[in-house]
Image (tube, rainbow, N blue to C red):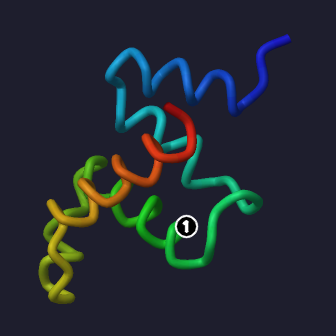
Amino acid sequence: METKTSKAISLLHSGYLKEALAIFSTFRVGFSKEERRTLKIAHECLSGNAGFYRQLGIDTSAEVEKSKSILIAKYL
């Protein structure tokens, strides 16, 4: 049976960052509070809500890049 983690890692390896973030952003264990926040913001930005976060003054492209580096450091 395929676990959520293995499916998310497989998606990440295949280059489907948005889909991988959809899974990783739901994880509560294994990430710090700041990392979880970054993963959630990056997922929402890739899902079409980037304008909202830009209005709040958050650099959305930086959040997406930080989420990539978090996932690469932990799973690749």
Q: Between 28 and 75, which is closer to the camera in this rendering?
A: 75
Across and down, in percent, residue 68 comes to 34, 47
Would you say 31 lies left or right of 59 here? right
Q: Relative to 30, is 44 on the left or the right?
A: left
Q: Residue 23: x, y in percent?
A: 58, 41
Determine the image quadrant of residue 58.
bottom left
Residue extending furthest bottom?
56
User: Circle 1: is it few (<14), some (14-19), or many (20+) Cα within 10 Å?
Assistant: many
Could you say where residue 52 lies in the image, as x and y percent from the top left?
A: 21, 75
- Residue in the picture at 43% in, 20% down: 13
Residue depicted at x 27% and y 65%: 63
Judge whether 25 appears above or below 37 on screen.
above
Direction right: furthest residue: 1
Which residue is found at the position 36% from the left and 38% from the top?
Answer: 18
On screen, residue 49 above or below 54 = above
Circle 1 sits in a helix, a strand or a loop, which is it?
A: helix
- Residue 64 is drawn in which quadrant? bottom left
- Horizontal relation, residue 55 to residue 41: left or right: left
* Amino acid type indicated by mark 1: Arg
Return the residue at label 1: 36
Out of 40 and 47, give the one closest to the viewer.
40
Residue for point 15% across, 60% down: 61
How many numbered circles does the render carry?
A: 1
Q: Position of residue 7 (x, y in %)?
A: 63, 22
Image quadrant in which the N terminus is located: top right
